[in-house]
Amino acid sequence: MERDDVYEYSLDTHHDEETGKKVRKKIYQVLFIMSAVTIFEVALGLKLSGDPAYATFLKYTFISLTLLKAGYIVMVFMHLGDERKNLRWTILAPYLVLIGYLIYICLTEAIYAGTIRPSIEMLFNAGSGGGGHH
Amino acid sequence: MSAHATTQPTDTKTLWGGGTSPFGISYGKMMMWFFLMSDAFTFSGLLTAYGFMRHKFHDVWPVAGDVFVHFPFYDGHIQLLYVAFMTFVLIASSVTMVLAVEAGHRMNKKGVIIWMFLTIIGGAIFVGSQAWEWYHFITGTEHGAVRTFIKDGAWVTEVFHGANLKVNEYGHPLFADFFFFITGFHGFHVFSGVCINIIIFIGVIQGRFEKRGHYEMVEKSGLYWHFVDLVWVFVFTFFYLL
């Protein structure tokens, strides 16, 4: 059924063969980068995870590489990088602000977790039977 | 895509004056973005809670690399190799999805069919792998762990195997709770993503989008599918690697 009350803004999303080739090239480039990063992560984890001297280095390397991969997925695969700037910030800004706040509050207030609710902690510890052979 | 920026008016008065999309995007796609944003908040909350509890119980928290060591058709233990394989399958299926969207932009029906089919297969492999991993986590090791508790006024000691929502032979039970909840929630997203992709796939075969003149539905389900991949990238890092 044809509806004339719906605006169609998607009709000019077509592209020709020439542009298609460029887009595909970009997609394969990103695939290569993401596979290389994942293999690098696993190799790094296998090699260094036993050594406590590298623990902090590993943690921040993994987190930054993850953010790199996430950036590629959102900006290239989900085409947010090709959208208008106002849409891009409508999506990203609330997320960055609120999640930044959540992480901040967990990092700064978490030190009280053990002191304020000791009874809850005891409950959890009594319930745990595990860790027997670790 | 980028074509919007040049073909549509850029001064604020015309942009917000009505009759045009200020964001240069269709209603459906924008609502998909808003839904994905709210879903991203949910997953961020779950992963932050995971980090919080892990930090709190770090001395009895299991190392994921020591828990997920199984690989199909192989008796020995290989740390995280199967999870790395699953990650690769999901990233690959994300790539086939974006290729399907690209084929849709060229109105290439055959291309969309092929790439969407591969995407669905990749998603099915991922969901199956996750079920397999759950099975091994729930069954546990032959060795098991010992727990002591009071039953009818007397202390009882027993050996138990595997993990569920109450006990976890590998360490703190909260690890199992978060594992079931986070990977379960994500796995359900993958499952519904596969279902959505199958529905769109049937529509493509029937020529519904060919008739409509554009393949934007493939783009919308593609957005959802990439989001599922995006979440897994974070779950992989925070649950398995760190």
Image: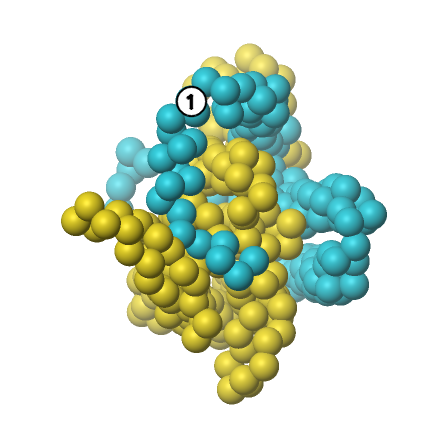
Chain colours: A cyan, B yellow
Provide the residue designation for mark 1: A117
Residue A16 visible from this viewpoint: yes
Which one is nearer the viewer's eye here, A130 or B26? Answer: A130
A64 left or right, relative to A77: right
Q: Residue furthest left?
A: B152
Question: Is A42 in front, or is B151?
Answer: B151
* Quadrant in the picture for residue A102: top right
Q: In x, y percent, where is residue B240? A: 58, 55
Q: Residue at x 65, y 40 (%)?
A: A81
Using a 10 Å C-alpha cutoff, classify the residue at mark 1 as few (fewer than 14 neighbours), some (14 to 19) or many (20 or more): few
- Where residue B204 appears, as percent x and y from the top left, is 37, 66
Q: Position of residue A34 (x, y in %)?
A: 70, 58
Residue B150 placed where, x, y %?
A: 26, 48
The residue shown at (58%, 63%) is: B66
Q: Name the amino acid, label 1.
A: Arg
Residue at x 58% of width, y 81% of height? B76
